[in-house]
Image (cartoon, grey):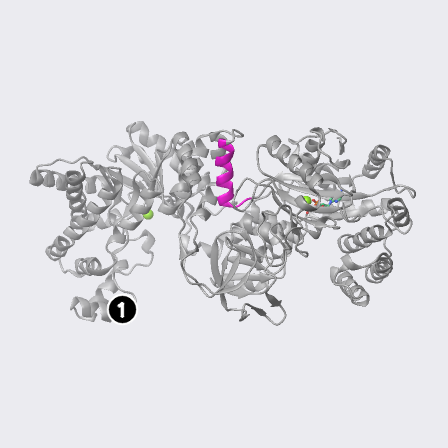
């Protein structure tokens, strides 16, 4: 098979579609060559090379370097240079590139081909020996670290000394002679540390760099990143060898990164950063705070005004803006573009789909429809449903009082408060204890990924809007402030000072990622109102989806939230939540403590008007939309106090001896409450409870219908049924109550009686159950527990091991176990509908708000999903995507 694909000069062997083979980067370089953008020519080694490299025990495939040599000869002929030549040396970058982008995770080595001889030729040819030695020292520093395993700290120490000796601040200030001696010291250090000299032979350098880039695929940080982002281990990374262009060559050279639209807000304007006289990773590493591309970019104290690329190099900037526009229209999506300017000449080095915040993603999708770039269906399919949740996340109340510790760049929006930590380890340790943290670093590196994931927010004192910290935080949807240069950070001492504050680890700060501010303590936050784009996108989703979406709600506040977020009814109203507090709780306890049925009925009669009022309110809020109400589900002891202290208090409140309460608690104790005296079993032992609930529901429906004119059809749901006769028993009681209510009020309201399918037997016997049930609601939390025989509350002890070992791919309590639990659902749906074609089918477990599970619900033809109010928008979008 063909292992090498060439690109450059308006042509390419590959194209944009071949990301699995050429990696995202290689495919994009090929595509950009094809459409005539200025791309330095190169060769991409396919991901097959990576596979063979690992299969062969970390050796390059036989014959590969021979083919590379031939390819480089052609490449050199095009550029008038020769790899390993001494007069006009061709220099190469060796770049990683996986099918799915893993920013900064894999290695890249620049300036391959430089040695003691070619560095002189490069200096002579360019007339700029300083630039030649700067490139050479960069090669030594990167190659020494990445290929030869010399600690980066060794080089940094040498640089520090050299800068100190020369009296300059950074290596940018070193003259040619100083760089030349720096090169000598780097070489000596490599030889001392690695036990062998830096290879002068260009081909040896090249194969060493290729092997190192391939090896970086299996570095622990790359593996961790793939895990976190669900990226498969294979096919691995492609490797691109590309002719170097030099952003570090003189005053009219620069390197930078741009987004074709603002990745934070989605605003349509070219947005990015650049560094004059720099090469490659200086920008993304966040070690230097770069300059803005245009003057409109947000500024921090550190960012000098008036030095934008638009002003410094207006012609080149224009060419770049045109290239970005071209790329966006070609890919029909926002791009992140890496570029280099060599002596005023523009080169595009990479383009990829830009990572963006939830807010930006939404705005971009909607605006691109308005611009005619994409259609509504595409817009709907582009927005990640889970990202919508971030839009409803809190932000700092603009009217609240705050103490500003420092200002930086608004790198990722939203706000969060937490204890300051100075290391990723500490962030993880505190997260394990459930403590919210703000990770504070000078800058972040790929090794900080897990720490960033554990923290609530990220603050860096250096770096810009495209630094590692900024990009990763936006991807994670976490607030981030970068470049807060006025802060003095001493990681060793664990101190952060600035704005008159002297903070240490454990002190609380609030990070305002939208405003780029660090605030002392916790501050007032507000929930933002969803934007117009939010409503429009969801409006399109509503026209596309087939599945209805309901909310789970029992309180008026939840019902209102569900309604506001577009729920088309309530799919689960858990009545027990309506009697857990206050007067209702007291009456419920009286019911439980009553010595006989008459006593229970007396207390239930007092509870009735309270419950009825609750239902009236729910029905009014839902304005005639369906409301599914589940009869009492938990075992009765859940209503009784637990601790001795509570027992005394409750007994006093109820005016009963504490001893009587204690005795009843002991009687009701169960060794396995999840499978105990609960659900419909309660209604069978104490039918009067179910009767009171049915009466409250039906009377409320009558009352609400009379008041609002919108008839409600309550759906009364019987939990934990496994036998048809259980349901028959309860339904007979409900029907009898309904008859009595109709006679009493003179109004006959419509209602349905159905059941939760949450036990395997119920799913198996769905045909029999559907003869009685008018609807099924899959209670997938319990159905997952009982099908897998896994207690959800105890699963944290072992499910992480299952996930780590790959025994399961997803937590079955988050995403439906399609093969097992899903199969039962499919079977129950089919069997139920065979008996009763109009049987209404829904889902009301946590899974109802999980996009992957919603896809499955669409597949098996359920009528609706129901989820917590804040997930309703997610479900609406996910339902639409499932239908596309
Ligand atoms: P990453 O995947 O980590 O972004 P890249 O392969 O894009 O790694 O390389 C990082 C940086 O190195 C690029 O942004 C670019 O600035 C620089 N670079 C890569 N190839 C070249 C080249 N041919 N000429 C000049 N600079 C290059
Ligand atoms: Mg890159
Ligand atoms: Mg249940």
Which residue is painted at 70% across and 46% down in the image?
A: 312
Q: Looking at this view, is 767 or 838 the one in front?
A: 838
Query: Is-magenta flag for residue 361?
Result: yes
Q: Is mark 1 within 8 Å of ligand 3?
A: no
Q: Quadrant of residue 865?
A: top left
Query: Is-magenta flag for residue 753?
Result: no
Left or right, 328 with respect to 872, comes to: right
Q: Which residue is mark 1?
A: 646
695 vs 660: above or below: above
Q: Residues within 10 Å of mark 1 (few under 14, many from 20)?
A: few
Left or right, 702 with respect to 299, comes to: left
Label 1: element kind: helix
Could you say where residue 326 lies in the image, as x and y percent from the top left? 63, 32
Could you say where residue 707 lies in the image, as x and y percent from the top left? 16, 40
Could you say where residue 781 lies in the image, as x and y percent from the top left? 38, 47
Q: Bounds of the magenta span?
A: 356-370
Main secondary structure of the magenta stretch? helix
681 vs 840: above or below: below
Q: Looking at this view, is 860 or 597 the one in front?
A: 860
Q: Looking at this view, is 325 or 648 the one in front?
A: 325
Quick check: can you spot residue 578? yes
Quick check: can you spot residue 150? no
């Amino acid at each position: 098979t063909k292992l090498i694909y060439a690109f450059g000069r308006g042509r390419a062997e590959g194209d944009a579609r071949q990301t699995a083979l050429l990696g995202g980067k290689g495919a994009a370089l090929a595509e950009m060559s094809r459409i005539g953008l200025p791309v330095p020519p190169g060769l991409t080694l396919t991901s097959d090379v990576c596979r063979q490299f690992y299969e062969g025990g970390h050796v390059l495939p036989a014959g590969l370097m021979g083919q590379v040599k031939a390819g480089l000869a052609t490449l050199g002929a095009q550029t008038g240079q020769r790899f390993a030549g001494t007069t006009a040396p061709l220099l190469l970058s060796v770049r990683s590139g996986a099918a799915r982008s893993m920013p900064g995770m894999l290695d890249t080595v620049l300036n391959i081909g430089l040695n003691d001889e070619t560095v002189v030729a490069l200096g002579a040819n360019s007339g700029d020996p300083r630039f030649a030695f700067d490139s050479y020292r960069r090669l030594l520093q990167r190659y020494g670290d990445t290929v030869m395993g010399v600690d980066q700290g060794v080089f940094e120490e040498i640089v520090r000394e050299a800068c100190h000796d020369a009296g300059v601040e950074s290596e940018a200030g070193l003259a040619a002679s100083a760089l030349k001696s720096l090169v000598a010291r780097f070489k000596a250090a490599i030889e001392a540390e690695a036990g062998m000299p830096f290879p002068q032979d260009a081909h040896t350098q090249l194969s060493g760099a290729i092997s190192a880039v391939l090896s970086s695929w299996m570095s622990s940080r790359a593996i961790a990143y793939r895990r976190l982002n669900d990226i498969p281990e294979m096919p691995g990374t492609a490797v691109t060898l590309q002719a170097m262009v030099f952003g570090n060559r003189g005053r009219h050279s620069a390197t930078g990164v741009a987004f074709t639209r603002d990745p934070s807000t989605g605003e349509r304007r070219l947005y990015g950063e650049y560094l004059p006289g720099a090469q490659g990773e200086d920008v993304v590493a966040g070690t230097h705070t770069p300059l803005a591309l245009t003057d409109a970019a947000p500024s921090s104290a550190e960012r000098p005004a008036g030095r934008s690329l638009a002003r410094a190099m207006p012609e080149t900037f224009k060419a770049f803006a045109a290239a970005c526009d071209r790329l966006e229209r070609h890919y029909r999506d926002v791009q992140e573009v890496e570029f280099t300017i060599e002596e005023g000449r523009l080169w595009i080095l990479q383009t990829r789909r830009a990572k963006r915040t939830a807010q930006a993603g939404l705005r971009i999708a909607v605006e691109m429809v308005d611009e005619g770039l994409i259609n509504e269906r595409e817009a709907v399919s582009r927005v990640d449903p889970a990202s919508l949740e971030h839009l409803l996340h809190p932000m700092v109340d603009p009217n609240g009082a705050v103490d500003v510790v420092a200002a930086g760049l608004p790198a990722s929006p939203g706000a969060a408060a937490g204890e300051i930590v100075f290391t990723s380890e500490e962030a993880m340790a505190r997260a394990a204890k459930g403590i919210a943290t703000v990770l504070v670093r000078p800058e972040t590196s790929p090794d900080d990924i897990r720490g960033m994931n554990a923290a609530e927010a990220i603050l860096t004192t250096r770096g810009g809007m495209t630094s590692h910290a900024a990009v990763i935080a936006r991807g994670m949807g976490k607030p981030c402030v970068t470049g807060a240069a006025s802060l003095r950070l001493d990681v060793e001492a664990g101190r952060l000072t600035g704005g008159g504050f002297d903070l240490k680890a454990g002190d609380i700060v609030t990070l305002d990622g939208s405003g780029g501010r660090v605030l002392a303590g916790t501050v007032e936050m507000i929930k933002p109102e969803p934007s117009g784009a939010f409503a429009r996108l969801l409006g399109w989703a509503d026209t596309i989806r087939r599945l209805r979406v309901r909310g789970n709600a029992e309180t008026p506040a939840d019902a209102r939230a569900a309604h506001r977020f577009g729920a088309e009814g309530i799919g689960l109203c858990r009545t027990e939540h309506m009697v857990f507090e206050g007067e209702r709780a007291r009456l419920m306890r009286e019911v439980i403590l009553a010595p006989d049925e008459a006593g229970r009925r007396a207390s239930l009669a007092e509870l009735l008007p309270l419950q009825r009022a609750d239902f009236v309110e729910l029905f009014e809020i839902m304005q005639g939309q369906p409301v599914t109400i589940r009869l009492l589900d938990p075992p009765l002891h859940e209503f009784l106090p637990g601790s001795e202290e509570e027992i005394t208090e409750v007994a006093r409140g109820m005016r009963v001896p504490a001893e009587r309460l204690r005795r009843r608690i002991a009687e009701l104790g169960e060794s396995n409450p999840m499978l105990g005296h609960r659900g419909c079993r309660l209604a069978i032992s104490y039918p009067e409870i179910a009767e009171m609930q049915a009466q409250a529901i039906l009377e409320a429906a009558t009352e609400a219908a009379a008041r609002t004119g919108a008839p409600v059809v309550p759906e009364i749901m019987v939990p934990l049924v496994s036998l048809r006769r259980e349901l028959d028993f309860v339904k007979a009681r409900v029907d009898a109550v309904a008859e009595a209510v109709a006679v009493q009020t003179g109004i006959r309201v419509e209602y349905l009686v159905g059941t939760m399918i949450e036990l395997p037997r119920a799913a198996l016997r769905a045909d029999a159950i559907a003869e009685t049930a008018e609807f099924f609601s899959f209670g997938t939390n319990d159905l997952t527990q009982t099908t897998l025989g896994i207690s959800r509350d105890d699963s944290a002890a072992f499910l992480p091991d299952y996930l780590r070992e790959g025994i399961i791919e997803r937590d079955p309590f988050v995403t439906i176990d399609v093969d097992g639990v899903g199969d039962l659902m499919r079977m129950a749906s089919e069997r139920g509908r065979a008996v009763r074609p109009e049987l209404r089918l829904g889902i009301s477990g946590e899974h109802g708000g999980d996009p992957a599970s919603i896809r499955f619900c669409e597949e098996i033809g359920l009528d609706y999903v129901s989820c917590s109010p804040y997930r309703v928008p997610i479900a609406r979008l996910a339902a639409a995507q499932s239908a596309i």
